[in-house]
Amino acid sequence: MLTREFVLSFREAAPYINAFRGKTFVVAVSGETVADGHFPGLAQDINLLTTLGVRIVLVHGIRPQIDSLLGKQGIARHFHREKRITDLPTMDIVKQAVGLARHEIEATLSMGMPNSPMHGSHLRISGGNMLTAQPIGVIDGMDMQYTGQVRRIDVAAITQRLEAGDLVMLSPIGYSPTGEAFNLTMEEVATHTAIALKAEKLIFLVDGRGVISIEDKLLSTLTAQQAEELHRGGNLPNDVTLYLPYVIRATRDGVSRAHLVSSKEDGALLAELFTRGGNGTMIARDPLVRVRTATIDDIGDILGLIRPLEEQGILVKRSRELLEMEIGNYSVLEHDKRIYGCVAMHAFTDAETAELACLAVSSDHRDAGFGEALLNHVEYQARARGLASLFVLTTQTAHWFVERGFVETEPSRLPMSRQEMYNYQRRSKVFIKTL
Ligand code: ARG
C-alpha cells in the first residue's frame, strides 16, 4: 500500500539529500553517549549519511571513560577552572580511555547485520596524527601539565581521507612536534576541525532535545546572538551550556549551521537533517526565513504561487511579460532557499503612497506567518522611501488586511493614475494603512 506520509517525507528530504552530497559534517559524540549504550542507533544513521555521500568527521569524547579508569586505579581527579589537570599518570589513563572508546565506536560502525540498515555497507574509518597540540601551560599559577589545546589541524590529510570515501574519526588527543601527547576536549577538537575544514555543519549530540526555553519549549532555530543571550541567561542543561559557546564560535567563523540533536531519541539525527523543521536546535549563521527582492530567475516560482489564486479570482491575472517588466517591484520569501511567498509594491509618482499587490503564500504554508513577513517587508520599504501610506485592492481577503491595520476607503482616494486603471467590473474594495 502506498503510504502518503512516506511519500511526502521522502519528497521533503530530497532537496536536503541533494544539498548535502559531498558536504562535510563534523559530528561530536560525547563519551557519555558511547558509555550509556546509545551509540549503536546513532551509528546506523551516521552510516546512512555516508552512503548518501555526506563526508563525516566523527569526534568522540572520553570524560566518563577517564573517570571510571581513574576510579579503578585509585588515582584522584584534579580540576582547575573546570579543566582537568593532566599529570603523567592521568595522561596514561587518557590514552587507555581513548583506546576503549575508539575501539568500541569502530566496532559499532563496522556492524553490518543482515536485516539492519547497515547491511551491505562497508564503511572505512580513518584516523591518526591529524591534530597538532600544545600545552595550555600555567593558569593562575597552576601547571596544567598534559592538558593541551589544538594548535593545528591537518586539513590536507583529513580532506584526502574524506575524498577517498572514509569516515574520519578524531579522538581528543593531539601530538606536539616534540613528540608528546596532550589531552584535549571533544568540543574544542570538533569546533576547530569544523572551522578548519569549512564544514557545512557542526553537530553536537546532546542528552535532551536541544535548547529548551524557560516555558519548556524546544527552541528550534536560533541565531548566534540569540544563542549567546540564552547562554548568558543560564538555566540550561550542563551539556548544552558546555557546547553553546563552541557552536556560536563555529557559526561566527564560517560554519553555516550548527545543530544540537538528541543522542537518545531514535532517528533524531535523520529528522533534524532531512526535514525542514528539524527535530533539535539549529544555530544558523544566516536567518532561515528571508524576504528579498525578486529577480528574473524567480518568475517561474512566482507564477507557480499566483496561478492558483488567479484561478480562484483572488488575484487579478498577470501575464508573464508584465511580471518580467515589473519584476523589480516584487519581493519573494525564501525558507531554506526555497520560495514560499511573494508580494509586489507599486509606488506612484503622483502621490506619497504605494500599492501592495500580488501577496501570495504557498497553500501548505499559510499558517507559518509568511504573509505577515511579506507585509512587514513592504511596510518597511515604504517607510524607508518616506511614503505616508500603503493601499491594497482586494475582493476576497479584506479581513486579513483589516486585522493588520488597514481601513476601508473610497476608490476616489486612490492616486489619480491608479484611479484611471481601477477596474469597475471587479469592484475591488480599497483599503489603506497609514504608516
Ligand atoms: N534539515 C535542514 C538542515 O539540516 C533544516 C533543519 C532545521 N532544524 C531546526 N532545528 N530548525 O539544514
Image (spheres, rainbow, N blue to C red):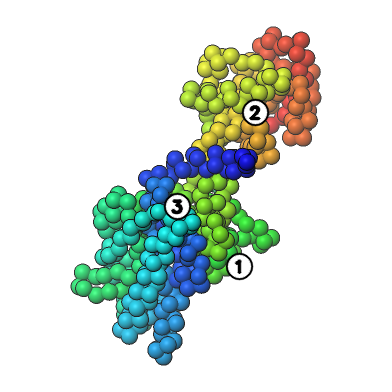
Q: Amino acid at mark 1?
A: Asn
Q: Residue at x 48, y 25 (%)?
A: 297
Single out the mark in the foreground, 2 or 1.
2
Q: Quick one: SS at disc 2? A: strand
Which element carries disc 1, helix, strand or loop? Answer: loop
Mark 2 lies on residue = 360
Q: In the rendering, at what x and y percent does residue 62 appear?
A: 41, 73
Within 10 Å of disc 2 (Cα), the crowding (few <14, some 14-19, many 20+) is: many
Crowding at dot 3, Cα within 10 Å, few <14 / some 14-19 / many 20+, comes out as some
Q: Is mark 2 within 8 Å of ligand 1?
A: no
Q: Position of residue 345 (x, y in %)?
A: 61, 24
The CA distance from mark 2 to mark 3 is 38 Å
Question: What distance separates the C-alpha of mark 2 from that of mark 1?
Answer: 41 Å
Earlier-in-chain disc, 2 versus 3: 3
The structure residue drawn at horizontal position 40% and vertical position 54%, both measured from the top left corner, is 120
According to the picture, the residue beneath numbered tag 1 turns out to be: 235
| 143 versus 288 height, above or below | below
Disc on the earlier residue, 3 or 1: 3
Asked if the residues shown at circle 2 and circle 3 are in contact, with their CB atoms under 8 angstroms apart, the answer is no
Indicate the quadrant containing the C terminus: top left, top right, bottom left or bottom right.
top right
Locate residue 212 relative to residue 153 in the image: left or right.
right
Closer to the N terminus: mark 2 or mark 1?
1
Q: Is residue 302 above or below residue 241?
A: above
Q: Of all residues shown, which one is farthest toward the left?
A: 178
Discs 2/3, front: 3
Residue 400's tag is none
**Which residue was labeled with disc 3?**
48
Q: Position of residue 121 (x, y in %)?
A: 39, 54
What amino acid is labelled 3 in the image? Answer: Leu
The amino acid sitting under disc 2 is: Ala
